[in-house]
Amino acid sequence: MTPDSGSIVLNGRTLFDSKQKINLSVQERNIGLMFQSYALFNHMTVYENILVGMKGHDKKLQEEVIKSYLKLLEIENLKDKKPKMLSGGQKQRVALARILAQQPEILMLDEPFSALDSHLRFMIEEPFKKALQSFKGTVLYVSHNRQEIYKYCDQTAVMADGQIQEIKGTEDLFMKCETVAAARLTGCRNMSKVKWLNEEEVHLIDWGITLKLKKEKQTYIKSSYDTIGMREGDMVLTSDLESDEVMAVEVGKLFKMPDKIKIDLWTSNGYKLIYTCSSREYHEIETLLNQKHIGVLIDETKLLYLRSK
């Protein structure tokens, strides 16, 4: 697809510029793109599929490079097999080896694990990560899966409404995001619009509670921060309903999942909060939850101060 306007520049080299009428062909761009379908050639062996992107290279060099990627991605025993004999995870590693053998300037991965079940993802995780780390160029990794992003990416850019809303080191973004879009995509499901009352107090409109901020947090009193978020696992449940930092809630439905338990909590003004915990943690608070009317202790250090735009 040809962009309507703008420019695309890779490492100082212009690939597209609408004003200068520059639009390099696919062959001239030297970009590696791994499709969700992997796009392997069914009539070729694994070795031949990887060789496709290396035409023009010395035959001995071709063999050395292909062998190195077969070993790195742990698919040496598959080199003479054809794609129809491979599992989804094996096909993915062959597709990645083919791209890496081309030595592109940038490697672009579009939801690379979307076609794999959770077991296959786990099985190829280590060789996949090694392959990405061995690549000397930039890797552009597109995904909606926050676990994958956290595992594989050094920096993360959050896209919403066609624009980058926030870009940070991945760990920093997950710990201290500053936009509603980033909070949602990194797993924060509890958010409330806020009204700043004065230098010390903020009213959480959706949750129906007013908080008195500690002195070091008062720097957040700016018109740009209009939302507060609280992650599901950062909530602390309590039987104390008297403290100013406790929000009264009613225990709603409980959903048991293989690795965690999700509980709906309803505020007095009808807002639903989501709380999650492990099975072990659930057994520790089961008696408390049976009381139906409990409190959520809001730990100010765990709150996210966010901008809607």
Image (cartoon, helix red, strand yellow):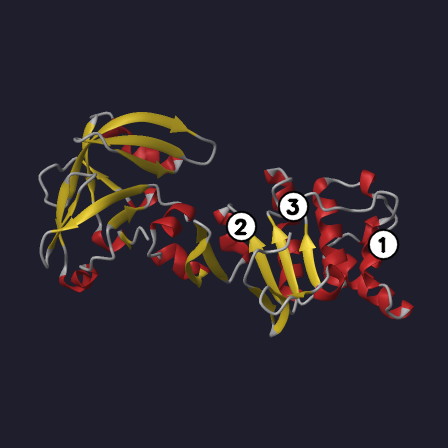
**Image-based side of 144 in relation to 222, left or right:** right
In contact (CB < 8 Å): disc 2 and disc 1: no
Query: Residue 170's spot in the image, x, y percent?
Result: 45, 59
Pick whichever, 146 or 39, lies toward us: 39
The residue where tag 3 is placed is 123
Q: Which residue type does callout 2 highlight?
A: Glu
The residue where tag 1 is placed is 47
Total marks placed: 3
Q: Is residue 10 above or below residue 77?
A: below
Q: Decide: few, some or many residues near mark 2? Use Cα within 10 Å; few <14, some 14-19, many ≥20.
A: some
Q: Earlier in the sequence, mark 2 or mark 3?
A: 3
**Image-based side of 27 in relation to 56, left or right:** left
Q: Which residue type does callout 3 highlight?
A: Met
Q: Which residue type does callout 1 highlight?
A: Tyr
User: Is residue 164 in view?
Assistant: yes
- Residue 56 falls in image quadrant: bottom right
Q: Decide: few, some or many residues near mark 1? Use Cα within 10 Å; few <14, some 14-19, many ≥20.
A: many
**Image-based side of 52 in relation to 185, left or right:** right
Q: Earlier in the sequence, mark 2 or mark 1?
A: 1
Query: Residue 244's spot in the image, x, y percent?
Result: 10, 45
Identify the residue shown where x is 85% and y is 44%: 82
Query: Residue 232's spot in the image, x, y percent?
Result: 33, 42
Identify the residue shown where x is 36% and y is 45%: 188
Identify the residue shown where x is 88% and y is 49%: 80
The residue where tag 2 is placed is 148
Mark 2 against mark 3, which lies toward the viewer?
A: 2
User: Label 2's element?
Assistant: helix
User: Label 1's element?
Assistant: helix
